[in-house]
Amino acid sequence: MSPSPLLQSADRWQGVIHRYAKYLPVTDATPRISLSEGNTPLVRVDHFVEAIGGKFSLFLKYEGLNPTASFKDRGMTLAISKACEKGAEVVACASTGNTSAAAAAYSARAKLKCVVILPHGNIAMGKLSQALIYGAETIAIRGNFDDALRIVRELGGTGRVEVVNSINPVRIEGQKTAAFEICDQLGRAPDFHFLPVGNAGNITAYWRGFQEYADRGLVETTPRLMGWQAAGAAPLVEGKPVAQPETIATAIRIGNPASWQGAETAVRESQGGIDKVTDEEILHAYKTIAQTEGILAEPASAAPLAGLIRAVHNQSIPEGSLVTATMTGHGLKDPDRALKTAGVEPTVVDPSTSAVMKSIGM
Ligand code: AN7
């Protein structure tokens, strides 16, 4: 049977390596382990801007719509492809949840053994389910992410496992494609880009992506990068590691970021900044974006939105600016938080139209 013309269509999206190969450390000999990640929507959110009293245009890069529902797929397609090229048999990562979900999925597709090390009791339910159902060896340590990362570094040191955390530089290379896509989608670079910061790989990657596009003359400017940490886990703001990081945004519950230097460089060179927002501000932004725009992002992703609300109060965004922000992970990763934050329960009624009408006040 000959393949249908559809299967040969050059237009079919085949993931970030296929689309951006010439900007990535791959050759024709590199296997391409892809789940067609990337090409995520850039959604204009005027109602949210109006609700917070802003006078700028805001677009959200909806990374929760990636195959494992977070931005981590961009770096993982490359990390797992390179691991296969090297002939690795076992990959490992430490994770607050999303990296492990991505590592587990891409490893399944590549037939690699995958070991994920997680902080016991501090992983959102969706992320834990992903690691388990994709078939990763899932180890929960009685410690936090920083302990898990230390262990993974040591495992890597044995030379017997390939580490796929962002200390593996190809992860950052893959993640920079989100900045490329934003420029491609807007036809220019934004004036400001807001994003959450945990282990600081992503802010490092975005800066590299925006710079490379500018260096190649594909855009004329680069944005100011505005990174947001949770107040209880804000080592980059405090200027020193935090021994016991705490926040409801478990994705960014990290006290000693691996890409510390990368974040500082990104902020300095882009003339941006890193600041912190409280859990209360994060949850307010999380609920507001859901209820004004129908966009459900996980709490960590709401940190930059909380940051934007602050920026409006401080009048630090000039009128008419073009602003973008990354919604790094899907809100369904953490349904418990959605239920708690909604603060309401379903109304239970008898199975009659009149009971429903009475209940909804009609
Ligand atoms: C939704 O999965 O570190 O500053 O182990 O899952 O690049 O670390 C996740 C991080 C933001 C922070 N938003 O990005 C992990 C992990 C979400 C995240 C971040 C994470 P980095």
Image (cartoon, rainbow, N blue to C red):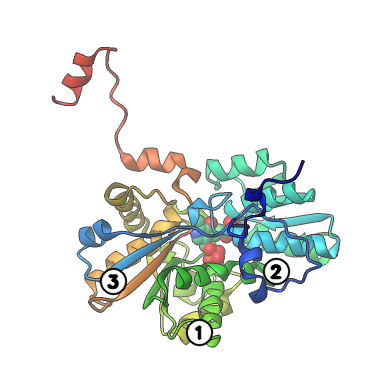
The CB of the residue at mark 1 lies under 8 Å from ligand 1 = no
- Which amino acid type is marked by label 2? Asn
Please state the quadrant of the image where ligand 1 appears: bottom right
Instruction: Name the residue: 48% across, 86% down.
Output: 269
- Which amino acid type is marked by label 3? Ala
Q: Would you call the spot at circle 3 few (<14 residues within 10 Å), some (14-19), or many (20 or more)? A: some
Q: Residue furthest left?
A: 362
Instruction: Name the residue: 25% across, 12% down.
Output: 352
Q: Image quarter for residue 277?
A: bottom left
Quarter of the N terminus within the rendering: top right
Q: Position of residue 35 (x, y in %)?
A: 64, 52
Q: Check the image and report above or below for 358 versus 58.
A: above
- According to the picture, the residue beneath numbered tag 3 turns out to be 311
Question: In the displayed structure, does residue 282 sit left or right of residue 30?
Answer: left
The CB of the residue at mark 3 lies under 8 Å from ligand 1 = no
Q: Check the image and report above or below for 23 versus 253.
A: below
Q: Check the image and report above or below for 340 versus 96.
A: above
Question: In the displayed structure, does residue 327 sit left or right of residue 36?
Answer: left
Quarter of the C terminus within the rendering: top left
The residue lying toward the viewer, choosing from 193 and 40, is: 40
Q: Would you call the spot at circle 2 few (<14 residues within 10 Å), some (14-19), or many (20 or more)? A: few
Q: Secondary structure at mark 2?
A: loop
Mark 3–mark 1 distance (CA, rounded to whole Å): 26 Å
Pointer 3 with pointer 1, Cβ within 8 A: no
The CB of the residue at mark 2 lies under 8 Å from ligand 1 = no
- According to the picture, the residue beneath numbered tag 2 turns out to be 168
Question: In the displayed structure, does residue 144 sit left or right of residue 161?
Answer: left
- According to the picture, the residue beneath numbered tag 1 turns out to be 214
Residue 125 at least partly seen = yes
